[in-house]
């Protein structure tokens, strides 16, 4: 049986300095430089994510991080004010409003959620708790 001493996730980016600014300044998360040219992203619950540079990076086509917030409208407004564009899906299965928010709670289809991209093109969401 595998008995891990620790567990963490990781993902790649094409530009470590841009990722450090985005995750640290734009999203307000704690980001520190790692020993191998990587970044350590400290999550509010105490976990960590390993962000590493990859020359042939291909953006993830799935959500790599979900940021849980108390007020999704306020969070989306803050992201938009910082230049982050929430993705507005043109998909009847993901009907987003003008802000790019899927109002799942009203439709009994899960949380209110909006998606956006990091500078490397990876998908991130912000969702209301």
Image: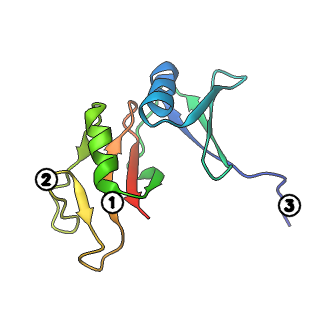
Residue that carries the numbered disc 3 in the rendered image:
3
Q: Hey, which residue is sitting farthest bottom in the picture? A: 108
Q: Residues within 10 Å of mark 2 (few under 14, many from 20)?
A: few
The colour scheme of the drawn protein is rainbow
Q: Quadrant of residue 104?
A: bottom left
**What secondary structure is found at the residue carrying circle 1?**
strand
Q: Nearer the viewer, residue 46 or 18?
A: 46
Give the residue drawn at x 84%, y 53%: 5
Q: Quadrant of residue 109?
A: bottom left
Above/below status of 111 relative to 13: below
What residue appears at the point 36 percent right and 68 percent down from the top-left corner?
111
- The residue beneath circle 2 is 98
Residue designated by label 1 = 113
- Work out whether mark 3 precedes mark 1 in sequence or the reverse, and give the earlier one: 3
Circle 3 residues within 10 Å: few <14, some 14–19, many ≥20: few
**Residue depicted at x 44% and y 64%:** 129
**Quadrant location, the N terminus:** bottom right
């Amino acid at each position: 049986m595998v008995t891990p001493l620790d567990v963490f996730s990781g993902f790649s980016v094409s530009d470590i300095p841009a990722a450090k600014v985005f995750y640290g300044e734009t999203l307000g998360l704690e980001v520190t430089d790692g020993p191998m040219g990587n970044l350590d992203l400290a999550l509010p619950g105490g976990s960590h994510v390993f962000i590493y540079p990859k020359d042939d990076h291909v953006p993830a086509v799935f959500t790599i991080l979900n940021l849980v917030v108390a007020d999704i409208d306020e969070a989306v407004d803050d992201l938009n004010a910082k230049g982050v564009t929430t993705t507005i899906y043109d998909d009847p299965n993901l009907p987003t409003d003008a802000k790019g928010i899927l109002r799942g709670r009203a439709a009994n289809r899960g949380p209110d959620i909006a998606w956006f991209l990091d500078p490397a093109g990876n998908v991130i969401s912000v969702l209301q708790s």
